[in-house]
Image (tube, helix red, strand yellow):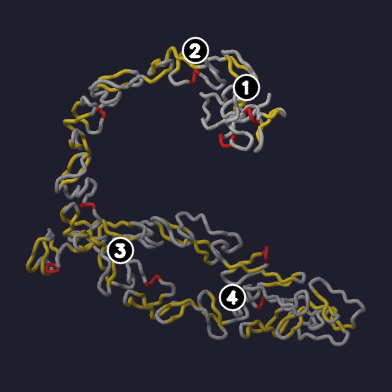
Amino acid sequence: MKKAICLLAAILVFSGCSLGDVKEKGASCPPKDAAHDASLGIIGGVECSETDCVVNDVDYTENIQFGYCPVEFSQCGYDSAKDVYYCAKIACEEDEHIYDDDCERDTLRHCGSHENDCKQLSGWKSGKCTDKQCVAEECVDGYEVFKGKCKAKSTDCDDGEHYYSEGSKCEKNSLENCGSHGNNCAELSGWKDGDCSSGGVCLAIDCDSGYELKSGKCVALTTCPEGQHLFDGTCEEDSLQHCGNHETDCTKVTGWGDGSCTNKKCSATACADEYVLNGDKCEARTNCPEGQHLYLGTCESDSIQNCGGHDKDCTSIAGWGGGDCVAGNCSATACLDGYELNGDKCEALTNCPEAQHIYNGKCVDDSVEQCGSDVNNCVKLSGWKSGQCVNQTCVADACVSGYCLNNGQCADGTANSNACGISGGACQKCTGNDVCKSGICSPVNDTVSCTKNQHVYNNICEDDSLYNCGTHGRECKIANAAPTGQDCVNGQCIVNTCIANYHVYKAENRCEPDDTDNCGSHGNKCSGIANANGYVCESKTCKPKACLGDNHVYQTICEPNSLENCGSHGNPCNRTKVSNSSDVTCTNTKGVCKATKCYEGYKVSEGICSSICPSKAQYYCSPGACCARPNCAGSCIMAE
């Protein structure tokens, strides 16, 4: 069956296809009650170009009229898949409609067209399809039948009522259902008593505590009279314990001694020990007169043990041999062995006079056992028999059998043509074509063949050494190796020991610096020390840099502060540490020894025992009197 799409009216107006030439017409297309825009027209079954309108090779140019099919096309169909109307020659029964080039019977699901489903109409409950129209006979709750359709029931109600949609009825206004179903006035915030107006509005006449009545509504309190503040919905009087709000307690403000709550703010007039008054606030004491330092909020005199700070003990400075505390700084005048005075500081020795070297922090004389360093022992050198330490270098004057003396060194003269000899005396250099064989210069054979740890040089066999390792002139100079910490093995320079603060990393044949990731050996990372706060690597050993909590550093551990070890190992906390104390304790993370009780006539003040007597009557006389002179002589007053 031939179909043609509905085109815009403007397309119909072109040469040879005018709208006014047709006298006969068929079905309207699209139907007048179709949902398409009224501006759409139809050329039923016709293919139109810009010059003519033709179908099946028949010219219908003069049979076209806007909105209608040619007379021989009796039906207007609709293709839902392509969303187009078309003219058709199909003739359907009165209770049928065209669907997909065929006739489909009118039903409630397809009434007048395939898409018109009566059961999907709003409010529909039951009815029938009549003359291609859905005609309702019964509607669901909330709807009523009106001219064959279901329309929503009216929601207009009388005064004092509201519409309850779920019940499909008008309901009287009440406290429980005021203005709408379920709007309970008694559940409103702050509601205590009231009524529901005829207009459906909750009108309060009394409110709960914490609320105030405003225009029939209960509004939460936001302000209070002067001298009061809001707490738990009521106004509470300002006081030292509740100043400006319930939570602010002036007596718990840091440093508070005494004062008042003024204009909702804590205003101090006196401060606790360790604090000073600044305006109406207590601030921690931050400075002291010259020659004193701050300790526990009071000013303490500088001393050797407490120089510029309570924990700054000059005698604990490395190398300290004597001195004084000057302007809060330790000023050394003498140093311990192994240290030297630089200005007023003691610094570890780094240099020694000629013919001496540093050993255990001291300058000691060079010797053949310790030549230039404690690890350079001339006696242990290969072939050494006797000699001296000269300019920190072992210089032999005689060698054992099997070696010969070569420029102050004992050389293996068995097969060394440059130093040949095994008598222990001076070496001989073979000349001409001679080579050293068993310590004797002898004529060379045609082929030179050297033993292990030798190499060919000038057609002779030369021993491998630190200066000629694997080949003549190749000197072993591995960075940071100890003076005697290298060997030549199989023609390769090998490091065995390193200088201080370095260790041998065999995998790479080098000296690696000690640090917290490689302490004493490669990959030995410092970790796992309980309560450690950082690490240091000293003498190839991991040690805590500092300690967390109530602990202090002791060797390789963090040791808890205690009466036996207060602040440091071996530093006891006892009554002799705090004058006039009868009982003490080691407190806080700094490990400070403080008094908890004092002898009669003294009181605990910031961890120390202070006299209860003023300076003008400084002698305590039991029970409770302070006198101007000893033995209760002179004028006396009662102690504080």
Going by the numbered disc 3, the residue's amino acid type is: Lys
Mark 3 or mark 1: name the one nearer the start of the chain.
Answer: 1
Q: Are marks 4 and 1 in contact (CB under 8 Å)?
A: no
Going by the numbered disc 4, the residue's amino acid type is: Asp
Residue that label 4 marks? 374
Q: Position of residue 586 (x, y in %)?
A: 33, 57
Q: Is residue 5 above or below residue 291?
A: above
Q: Quadrant of residue 614?
A: bottom left
Mark 4 or mark 1: name the one nearer the start of the chain.
Answer: 1
Q: CA distance from mark 4 to mark 1?
A: 128 Å
Residue that label 2 marks? 128
Q: Position of residue 632 (x, y in %)?
A: 10, 65
Residue positioned 32% across, 74% down in the render: 328
Mark 1 or mark 2: name the one nearer the start of the chain.
Answer: 1
Q: Are marks 3 and 4 in contact (CB under 8 Å)?
A: no
Residue that label 1 marks? 71
Looking at the image, which is closer to me, 65 or 504? Answer: 65
Mark 3 or 2: the one toward you: 2
Q: Is residue 619 left or right of residue 401?
A: left
Q: Residues within 10 Å of mark 1 (few under 14, many from 20)?
A: some
Residue positioned 55% across, 14% down in the render: 107
Q: Position of residue 140 (x, y in %)?
A: 41, 16
